[in-house]
Image (cartoon, rainbow, N blue to C red):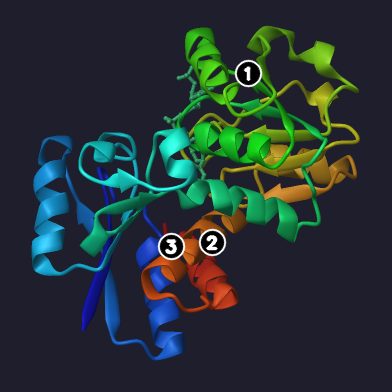
Amino acid sequence: MDCYGVIGYPIKHSVSPAMHNAAFRRLGIDAIYLAFEVRPESLRDAVFGAKALGIRGLNVTIPHKEEILKFVKPVGIAAKIGAVNTVVVDRLEGHNTDAYGAMKALENAGVGVEGKTALLVGAGGAARAIAFALVENGATVIVTNRTESKGLKLVEDVRKSGECIFYPYDRLEELKGKIDIIINATPLGMKGFESKLPVPEGLVDDVVVFDTVYNPMETLLISLAKRRGCRVVYGIDMLVFQGAEAFRLWLDVDPPVDVMKKAAIDALKLK
Ligand SMILES: NC(=O)c1ccc[n+]([C@@H]2O[C@H](COP(=O)([O-])OP(=O)(O)OC[C@H]3O[C@@H](n4cnc5c(N)ncnc54)[C@H](OP(=O)(O)O)[C@@H]3O)[C@@H](O)[C@H]2O)c1
């Protein structure tokens, strides 16, 4: 039996085991996917230990996505982003399927980004992946972030690849009518977190709204966007597509995306 897994700290909240094990079952693959709680100081041992044990694939989540670059070789957009969420263990090769997952979620909702202007709220790991993916696909990105210095650093990095500017978090009203897509890449709206809109209410008008938060699926932002008749893109789709792409990278087979999505939604109900 082949073994796959996800490493993070904490890791209890992860729905990746449910998603991948459901895919293995559906395809009749003799494999198991486990969640491993790995403390920051044990990351090196975990990576090389996984290789020694013959674990075939790892997903990587908070707080290891950047630190793991010390131990794996980033491939493709992961090198630009400077973060890895998927490792092909035998080659110690690091990929970033968050970027792919976000673009695929938009595409799946019928949203093309080329020539569009996207307001991206946040400058953490998720925002970084999305910003690089957007500019690579021909969008202009406006980054805003509570901590301005972090937002400015992201903009500085992304500008090497495409059009990207910073806008202060307290002046977002001024962007009304100037943006096509709003993307929330902060935890605002997440279960157990502040139930607050990440952008001024007035901006949610005649725009596509993509909330990367997936628990709950219907966030405050998504509900408002729907009431206003905006097209919405769900965080759960980004989650499922990033997982599906990792599955494809490890196994070189087409992942059963619908099965993975159902398993993820069922698992979230239990969290
Ligand atoms: N759908 C998916 O597949 C997927 C994947 C990854 C993440 N996500 C979502 O994205 C969120 C961010 O993840 P991450 O990995 O990027 O986390 P992260 O690296 O910790 O970054 C968090 C970001 O949110 C901002 N933030 C935190 N609390 C805030 C508040 N109260 N008000 C305004 N801004 C706030 C932070 O701003 P400061 O710089 O000021 O601290 C930072 O920019 C997660 O909570 C999750 O919901 C979804």
User: For the residue marked with disc 2, what is the amino acid?
Assistant: Val
As drawn, is 82 to the left or to the right of 188? left
Q: Please tell me which residue is depicted at 89% across the width and 40% down the height of the picture.
A: 228
Q: x, y (%) of residue 140?
A: 74, 28
As drawn, is 185 to the left or to the right of 27? right
Q: Quadrant of the N terminus?
A: bottom left
User: Which mark, by number, is residue 144?
Assistant: 1
Relative height, residue 133 to residue 7 (above, below): above
Relative height, residue 92 to residue 57 (above, below): above
Quadrant assignment, res 3: bottom left
Mark 2 highlights which residue? 240
Asked whether the beta carbons under mark 1 and mark 3 sit within 8 Å of each other, the answer is no
Q: Please tell me which residue is depicted at 41% across the width and 60% down the height of the picture.
A: 15
Which is in the foreground here, disc 3 or disc 2? 3
Mark closest to the chain's N terminus, 2 or 1 = 1
User: For the residue marked with disc 3, what is the amino acid?
Assistant: Ala
User: For the residue marked with disc 1, what is the amino acid?
Assistant: Thr
Any part of residue 107 in sight: yes
Classify mark 1: residues with Cα within 10 Å, few (<14), some (14-19) or many (20+): many
Q: Please tell me which residue is depicted at 48% across the width and 52% down the height of the picture.
A: 97
Mark 3 highlights which residue? 246
